[in-house]
Amino acid sequence: MTQADALTLGARAFLLSLQSRIVAAVSGLDGHDFVADAWHKEPGEQLQGNGITNILEQGSVFERAGCGFSHVRGVRLPASATAHRPELVGAPFEALGVSLVFHPRNPYVPTVHMNVRMIVATPVNGGEPVCWFGGGMDLTPYYGFEEDAVHFHQTCKDALLPFGEDKYPRFKKWCDEYFYLKHRNEQRGIGGIFFDDFQELGPQRSFAMLQSVANAFLLAYLPIVHKRQHMAYGEREREFQLYRRGRYVEFNLVWDRGTHFGLQSGGRTESILMSMPPLASWSYQRPVLPGSPEQSLYSDFLPRREWL
């Protein structure tokens, strides 16, 4: 067994456990169970492998919550994965990860995204398999609260601190630059941390960093949900929430590398698009009342800033 094979087995076991822990915690909070949809990609398809997509819809706290695990193999890395690795163009690969997006019912509870993944590719001209890691988490509020943003970012920083004081500032900046709607000159939310093509600490230590980030997710998000889920809201707040969800859809379909990787590599479309909200809306040049809580999102929370 090669080092890459051993690392892949360890990553699979961790990711399946991570998915189970997150689903159990969120199900307990919501009071409704996730539906588990196990799937397989058979030999002869563009991708081979398996996964479990867990979906909760029309819950008491979450209007839609998806948490998916996948482990697939392909004959050729898609273009979205080789943009920074020209030496791996055409390489066979193996990819596994957990990805989640939770869309809350209450507009005062922010939407959250997390993804952690490992990819192994074998150069077509020979040589040892190359493995790298990616992922992170980010928060997308509809109505901003300073203490929530600080808590989320502090938890991310704490998870990265054992791996170097440089990691949080680097990954926070990376997140701000990545979750950015270029066509609107607008951030998707208040960010968090994001990293990709990461292997600089070596395979084992890089994997340990990924585990630390993943294990911090519930600590970062659930206290915010507990604090905001019972706040009273009306039609105005709901309408603004649906309008801002439209931005989420735009980013995922136009810019997100994970969505592009899944679709380009022949992944399972239903699972790839589980991140979509159940409802969203668009309006033409929607005005925002100066001095309103909605305007505060644009002026005080979406512009890039240092939260800590």
Image (spheres, grey):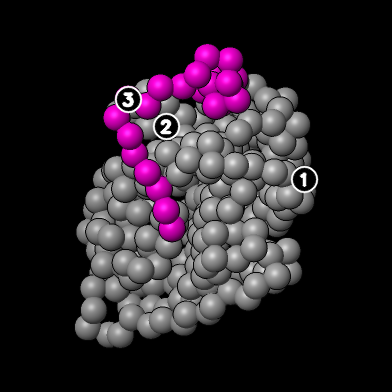
Q: Could you tell me residue 185's position as x and y percent?
A: 37, 23
Q: Is residue 263 left or right of residue 148?
A: left
Q: Which residue is mark 3?
A: 285
Q: Is residue 129 visible?
A: no
Eye-nearest disc, 1 or 3: 3
Q: Is residue 242 left or right of residue 73?
A: right
Secondary structure category for the residue under label 2: strand
Q: Earlier in the sequence, mark 2 or mark 3?
A: 2
Amino acid beneath label 1: Lys
88 in the magenta segment: no
Q: Which residue is mark 1?
A: 227
Q: Residues within 10 Å of mark 1 (few under 14, many from 20)?
A: few
Magenta-drawn stretch, dominant element (helix, strand or loop) = loop
Q: Residue at x 37, y 26 (%)?
A: 286
Q: Could you tell me residue 89's position as x and y percent?
A: 24, 53
Disc 1 to disc 2, C-alpha distance? 27 Å
User: Residue 173, located in which quarter of the rendered image?
Assistant: top right
Q: Which image quadrant: the C terminus?
A: top right
Amino acid beneath label 2: Tyr
Q: Earlier in the sequence, mark 1 or mark 3?
A: 1
Amino acid beneath label 3: Gln
Q: Which residue is mark 2?
A: 180
Residue 91, compared with residue 49, is above or below; it is above
287 in the magenta segment: yes
Eye-nearest disc, 2 or 3: 3
Which stretch appears magenta? 278-301
